[in-house]
Every structure is written in C-alpha cells, then in structure tokens.
Image (tube, helix red, strand yellow):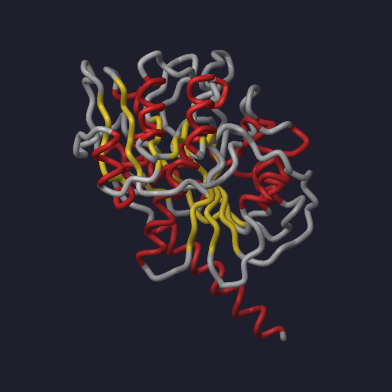
C-alpha cells in the first residue's frame, strides 16, 4: 500500500502527455495531493502548489510519485538526485516507469540507508498464484473495450465516483500503473507472466461480504493482436457480474496495428460475454461508455443514442455526460436478481 499524501514530481516536462500519470492522480485523488515538484524548464502544471521535497514533507507528504514519463519508460538524469533528496526528506518514492527505482545504485543505497520504501508499481508481487476460477462472494464490474487506450480506467473511476455519491459501497481496483498510483494499490497485469494473469485479477478483487462492488479496471481488447491475452486473463480472473463496454467512435484501426479494423460494438460485447461466462455464467452487460472527445456535443449525443438503440443499453460519455444511466441499469439489473433469488428461497 502506497502511503499518502503525495507530492507529484513533474520534472522538466514540456508535453502534457508526459505527465498523464500525475494528472490522473491529481484529478481522481485531489485530496491526497499536497503539491507538485517542477524543475526549471517545466512547461506543464497540474494546478497544485509548487514546492520542494522538504516543503512537501513539512506539509505532511508521505510519498513522492514520479509523474513524468518518456517513450522508453526510464528515469531522466535530473530525476535521480530529486529522488534521493525526497528519500532524505523522509518520503517514500513510487514510480510507474519500466525502469525500476532499485536498479539505480544511488537510489537503492539511499533507500536502504534511510529505511525508506521504493514502489515500482509495474513490478508484480512475487507470490502470485494461478487463477482457480472458484466462485467468490461479492459483486464485480469489469470495463472492457473494442480497443486499448480508449477510457477503461476513466470509466471505471467515474463509475466508482457515481456509485459512492449514491451511498453505494464501491472500490476501484487497479490493473495498470496509473490506476495503481491513483488507488494506492493493485497489480499491473501487463507485467505479469501469462499463466498468472487470472490469478492477479483474483488477487486484485478478492471476496467481499459487505454488499459492495469492485470496479475492475480493464486492459487491452480481445480483438487486439498484441494485448488480447491480458484482456482474456482479466475476464476469467475477475469473474465479473457486469461488463461496461468502452469505445472511441471514429478510430481508424486498432491502436498501433494498421490493417486491423476496430470491431463492431455488438460483436465485441458478445465475445466478451462469451469469454466471461467461463468463470461467471450469469455475467451481464449494463452499459456502454464512449470517448467522444473528437466530436461536437450534438454529434456525441447522436452517436451515443445510436449505440444505445443498437445494443439496448445506456451509452454515455463519462466526461461529457457522466455515467448515471449506466449505474441506474446496473442497480436495476442486480436489485431485480436479488429479489428473484429471495423469492426463490
């Protein structure tokens, strides 16, 4: 478990996309962020107070999150002394980069000397087990997609927020590096050996007995030639009771693989439901989430209405429209199933 509050390190980033991890934490867990650390030349801001690691520690920060990223997923040269300074100020350090913090001698030695913790969130737990498929108590919703990188994490977090606003117990369960830094825990399934992916999903969302929901962050797509294996492992290990399908209208092809068209909504939903039934025969679809950022409000409303009519499910853009209609359908489906079960007894 990553200790909060956080100081978000942006380094000398000049591209907003380079700090998307930090932006995600600031947007979804603002109450846990005490400030941002920017070096000279940094051209982006999260709207947080700028402070040094010493000032952040004085404000109560417990962990510095490395919020900058680059194409290689490695630490910048300038980040190393900043991380050492954070450790010396009494902070732990967490990173979602491919390069492990402990592989840098100066960082590893400082952490050992000071008794501080290093969190490499892409490093899976060493004691993962293979999935068993044994039914477990609790309710689970998994977000799935026609492709990768189209809003499964955002949709999952939006569902958690909307359900909590109604007084429903709901917890976001992270399966990617940014999600883990937002949630403070989880397993980055893209770094898990294939045989253990379903077991990782079972670990992320164990049995619960409080009547609440686990909202599990989906990854990849069953139709993506690169990432379908991760998507299938999540479907089996999550044992989802409900699915929400995520899609970006107008995408010309599967991300990173020209020549592979994005599949249709109905086909994608049917295949995901079919795969999910291996471990939960009663799984059902409760909604569709669109990323309509490339369209006008009028066009977005039309696209969502067409998808809703095609699938007979509510379709919303979580950013523009929220997810209340999807939550309504979720609750309606499972209140009805609970009533039928009670009547049967």
Above or below: residue 307 compared with residue 252: below
| 110 or 55: nearer the viewer | 110
Residue 96 in the image: state x and y as whole percent: 49, 31
User: Residue at left 73%, top 46%?
Assistant: 199
Name the side, left or right, on which 318 lies relative to 152. Answer: left
Horizontal arrangement in the rendering, residue 343 relative to residue 98 (left or right): right
Most foreground residue, 239 or 247: 239
Q: Residue at x 44, y 25 (%)?
A: 251
Quarter of the image containing the C terminus? bottom right
Q: Nearer the viewer, residue 195 or 312?
A: 195
Q: Is 98 placed left or right of 343 in the picture? A: left
As drawn, 212 above or below 162: below
Task: Count all numbered tags in the image, as a single digit.
Answer: 0
Residue 219 percent across, percent down from the top left: 57, 36
Which residue does the image show at 30% across and 48% down from the upper left?
30
**Residue 244: image x %, image y %?**
52, 49
């Amino acid at each position: 478990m990553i200790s909060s509050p956080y100081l978000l390190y942006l380094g000398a980033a000049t591209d907003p996309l380079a700090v998307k991890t930090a932006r995600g934490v600031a947007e979804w867990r603002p109450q846990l962020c005490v400030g941002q650390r920017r070096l000279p030349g940094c051209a982006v801001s999260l709207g947080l107070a700028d402070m040094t690691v010493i000032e952040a520690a004085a404000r109560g920060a417990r962990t510095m999150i490395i919020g900058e990223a680059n194409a290689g997923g490695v630490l910048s040269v300038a980040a190393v002394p900043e991380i050492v300074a954070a450790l010396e100020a009494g902070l732990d350090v967490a990173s979602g980069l491919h390069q492990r913090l402990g592989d840098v001698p100066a960082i590893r030695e400082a952490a050992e000397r000071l008794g501080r913790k290093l969190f490499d969130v892409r490093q899976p737990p060493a004691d993962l087990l293979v999935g068993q498929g044994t039914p477990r108590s609790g309710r689970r919703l998994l977000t799935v997609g026609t492709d990768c990188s189209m809003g499964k994490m955002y949709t999952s977090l939006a569902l958690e927020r909307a359900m909590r606003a109604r007084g429903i117990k709901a917890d976001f369960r992270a399966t990617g590096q940014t999600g883990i830094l937002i949630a403070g825990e989880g397993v980055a399934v893209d770094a898990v050996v294939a045989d253990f992916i379903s077991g990782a999903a079972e670990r992320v969302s164990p049995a619960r007995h409080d009547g609440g929901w686990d909202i599990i962050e989906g990854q990849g797509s069953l139709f993506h030639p690169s990432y379908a294996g991760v998507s299938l492992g999540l479907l089996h290990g999550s044992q989802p009771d409900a699915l929400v399908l995520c899609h970006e209208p107008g995408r010309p092809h599967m991300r990173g693989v020209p020549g592979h068209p994005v599949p249709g909504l109905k086909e994608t939903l049917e295949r995901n439901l079919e795969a999910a039934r291996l471990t939960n025969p009663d799984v059902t679809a409760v909604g569709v989430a669109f990323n309509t950022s490339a369209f006008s409000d009028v066009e977005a409303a039309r696209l969502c209405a067409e998808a809703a009519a095609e699938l007979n499910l509510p379709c919303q853009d979580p950013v523009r429209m929220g997810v209340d209609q999807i939550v309504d359908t979720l609750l309606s489906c499972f209140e009805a199933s609970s009533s039928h079960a009670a009547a049967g007894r």
